[in-house]
Image: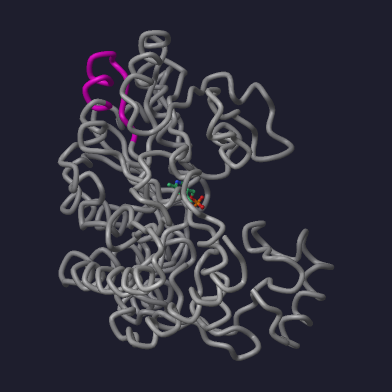
């Protein structure tokens, strides 16, 4: 990113750095002293920074915005709920069941559900429920997957520092300080789409595996997806060993299809987590699945405890009800898919023009862009793509008014409001950005 003079952003950052570590409320929002973004408004598919630069946004807050920023169909329901009913009371209203019934009507994998406030909390709830049901501890996770910021899943495969030519598997390292080694005790990780690896893990630990926890389409690893065969393999191996299959659909749920990734595979998880698109930007999440598994949440002696002060508050529930109703009753997701296809087509024209080998991973509503000859099958394959060229291209796009994460592990997110954008303009900007990326270096 070139440093464009942004006086208001500079002032904002100087103030923020005295108030918050790194000057931001979430460490991933820190883009360096000169480039950390401060916004003044968001609308539709655009965001405007405090220096009045407007961007078409494909980052969409890491995925929650499915309809568009400030969508009145959702906002009006929230305003109505909090002004006519209230926010929280520590008791239930009928709105809880309204939302669960909507989810059940879209997702046949859900019999019963519980709410939470974030994807992280939903994963914690699902894993605890799986452990309570199976009375086992071990969780199998997939390299390159992301399941939120709680200690137990804050261990990652260090592919960044891995030598692709070495025979060794990548090291597993913590996200940083403050994560006790003991939180790794019950976790085993495997590369995606490697049937032998999952067989070996079950041969060694089968009797103690509570669950496989997987993003079916890795929304935090360039939308690299499980193959149909691999997903079936996971389903079968869980069934054969009395383990549960947990699909983390925090990014894919209510985005890649009305019934999420599971409806694309035709394979059901025992437990599923949802967040992000379920509320079009309002903080709402949930987990659910088989009734017999979910009913482990109880006051029995060995029952699983779940809850929280803000769980199923009226802001969250009314936003979810409104968003799910729009997704269920309109062709918003079809519109999103068509827009995603058109954007991939124009990007492909640009990459081809410059002779760049490229491929797209994942569904049209959240596609990954990879510079290489074939779609990566797992995180280790991603390392072989030209991600440095992608980063340079993305930084140039940002300079030219297109916002996205400058890391090819984060997909391009599409919302319904993108249908109004000028695709010719985007193609011109993409061309200019790729030309500059190539000229800037010999990447
Ligand atoms: C697949 C997945 N699971 C869990 C989470 C954690 O969600 P949250 O940030 O709402 O805690 C994320 C966040 O990006 C995610 O992508």
- What segment is highlighted magenta in the picture? 234-246
Q: Is residue 305 left or right of residue 249?
A: right
Q: Quadrant of the C terminus?
A: bottom right
Q: Is residue 26 above or below residue 221?
A: below
Q: Residue placed farthest to the right in the image?
A: 18
For residue 225, what is the image quadrant? top left
Q: Is residue 410 above or below residue 71?
A: above
Question: At 34% across and 27% down in the image, what residue appears?
Answer: 194
Find the residue positioned furthest to the bottom. Answer: 52
Colour scheme of this structure image? one colour
Residue 310 x %, y %: 50, 53
Residue at screen point 64% across, 73% down: 1
Q: Position of residue 43 (x, y in %)?
A: 44, 83
Which residue lies at the image location 77% right of the left edge and 62% below the top edge?
A: 20
Residue 423, position in %: x, y?
32, 83
Residue 25 relative to residue 222: left or right: right
Residue 374 or 134: which is nearer the viewer?
374
Secondary structure mainly formed by the magenta segment? helix
């Amino acid at each position: 990113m070139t440093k464009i003079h942004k006086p208001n952003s500079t002032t904002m950052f100087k103030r923020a750095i005295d108030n918050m570590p790194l000057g931001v409320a979430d460490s991933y929002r820190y883009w360096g002293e000169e480039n950390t973004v401060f916004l003044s408004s968001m609308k539709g598919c655009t965001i405007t920074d405090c220096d009045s630069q407007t961007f078409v946004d494909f980052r969409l807050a890491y995925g929650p915005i499915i309809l568009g920023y400030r969508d009145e169909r959702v906002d009006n329901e929230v305003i109505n709920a909090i002004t006519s009913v209230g926010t929280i009371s520590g008791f239930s209203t009928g709105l809880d069941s309204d939302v669960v019934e909507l989810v059940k009507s879209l997702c046949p994998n859900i019999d019963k559900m519980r709410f939470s406030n974030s994807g992280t909390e939903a994963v914690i709830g699902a894993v605890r429920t799986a452990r309570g049901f199976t009375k086992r501890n071990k969780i199998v996770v997939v390299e390159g997957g992301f399941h939120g910021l709680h200690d137990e899943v804050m261990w990652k495969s260090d592919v960044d520092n891995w030598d692709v030519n070495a025979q060794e598997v990548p090291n597993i390292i913590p996200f940083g300080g403050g994560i006790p080694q003991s939180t790794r005790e019950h976790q085993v990780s495997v590369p995606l789409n490697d049937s032998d690896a999952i067989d070996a893990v079950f041969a060694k630990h089968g009797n103690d595996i509570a669950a496989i926890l997987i993003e079916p389409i890795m929304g935090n690893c360039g939308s690299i997806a499980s193959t149909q065969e691999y997903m079936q393999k996971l389903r079968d191996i869980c069934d054969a060993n009395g383990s549960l299959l947990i699909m983390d659909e925090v990014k894919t749920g209510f985005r890649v299809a009305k019934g999420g990734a599971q409806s694309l595979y035709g394979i059901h998880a025992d437990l599923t987590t949802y967040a992000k698109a379920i509320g079009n930007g309002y903080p709402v999440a949930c987990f659910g699945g088989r009734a017999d598994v979910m009913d482990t949440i109880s006051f029995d002696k060995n029952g699983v405890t779940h809850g929280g002060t803000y769980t199923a508050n009226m802001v969250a529930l009314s936003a979810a009800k409104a968003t799910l109703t729009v997704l269920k009753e309109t062709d918003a997701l079809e519109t999103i898919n068509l827009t995603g296809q058109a954007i991939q087509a124009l990007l492909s024209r640009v990459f081809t023009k410059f002779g760049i080998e490229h491929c797209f991973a994942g569904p049209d509503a959240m596609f990954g862009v990879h510079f290489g000859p074939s779609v990566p099958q797992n995180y280790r394959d991603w390392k072989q793509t030209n991600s440095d060229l992608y980063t340079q291209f993305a930084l140039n796009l940002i300079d030219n008014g297109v916002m996205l994460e400058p890391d090819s592990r984060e997909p391009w997110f599409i919302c319904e409001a993108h249908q109004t954008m000028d695709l010719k303009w985007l193609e011109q900007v993409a061309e200019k950005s790729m030309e500059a990326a190539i000229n800037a270096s010999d990447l």
